[in-house]
Amino acid sequence: MFRSPGPIAVQVGPLTIRWYGLLMATAMALGLWLAYRDARRRGEDPESLLKAAELALLGALVGARLYYVAFNLDYYSQFPAKILAVWEGGLAIHGGLIGGLLVGGGYAWRRGLPVRVYTDIVAPSLALGQGIGRWGNFFNEEAFGTPTSLPWKLYISPPHRPLIYAQDEFFHPAFLYESLWDVAVFGLLAWLFRARVARAPGALFLTYLGLYSAGRFFTEAIRTDPLMLGPLRVAQLVSLLGVAVALAAVPLMLRRARPAA
């Protein structure tokens, strides 16, 4: 059994540093460093890649927040000031991917940079960054699953429990399951798939999309705070789409990139 020590990492007078923000900053910095190294290894200009990646991060933050807010309009229409309170959590990864691709990919495309190569370079960083960032959910006591009595159960304090589970104390650490899966995806991309799909630019990113989506589909099934579209869990629908795109597109891209016999 384990429990969150609280959302605040350091507080000195009016200065407050929250775990959520600290972990997000760490994930971004590490992701940019890994992408820089891979760009140099591939013979790409790392400075151009970093510029596109930095813009993609800004787009991702905005996209992740707007996506989350869009599916929680009932709450944010009552408390509009909370829309900017990203330190309290509420960043949707699928929205972040859309925003990052639109802004960072749009910049690279307009500058004539290799967009698909860039997406392959950042794919492992995305997986690792998500694995690190998920721990922000632990400190904020969010993104947990249904009640459980398993040895790795997570204690959730009463103010953070859904009303339907108000009498339950221990829950599945869904954030942990997804974090472990994301780290595993990072390993698969960096040490197994990167060389195998190198001949088809864009294939590594789609492999990331498929692998991440497969894990997210299952962790989303046990979460108590999913984003909903009527009776449907939005993340599961998007995850199914991500898996389908990867299964259809990656083999096709590899066949088209196969050298002529």
Image: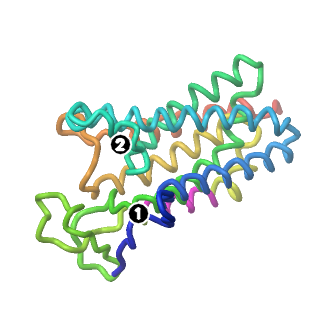
Residue drawn at (28%, 42%) of the image: 227
Callout 2: 10 Å neighbours few (<14), some, many (20+)?
many
* Res. 237 visible in picture: no
Vertical position of residue 75 compared to residue 180: above or below:
above
Give the residue pinned by disc 1.
Answer: 7
> Residue 74 versus residue 128: which sits nearer the camera?
74
The dominant secondary structure in magenta is: helix
Query: Which of the image's four quarters has the C terminus?
Result: top right
Residue 33 x/y as whole percent: 74, 51
**Left or right of residue 261, residue 142 in this image:** left
Amino acid tagged 2:
Ala
Give the residue pinned by disc 2.
Answer: 235
Residue drawn at (38%, 51%) of the image: 88
- Outermost residue, top side: 110
**Left or right of residue 20, residue 101 in this image:** right
Vertical position of residue 100 compared to residue 164: above or below:
above
Query: Where, by quadrant of the figure, is residue 121 drawn?
Result: top right
Alpha carbon distance from label 2 to label 1: 25 Å
Amino acid tagged 1:
Pro
Residue drawn at (29%, 33%) of the image: 80
Q: Does the magenta stretch include residue 186?
A: yes
* Magenta range: 178-187
Mark 2 element type: helix
> Residue 66 versus residue 226: which sits nearer the camera?
66
The answer to the question of whether label 2 and label 1 lie on touching residues, with beta carbons closer than 8 A, is no
**Left or right of residue 102, residue 233 in this image:** left
- Outermost residue, front side: 13
- Report the mark closest to the observer, 2 or 1: 1
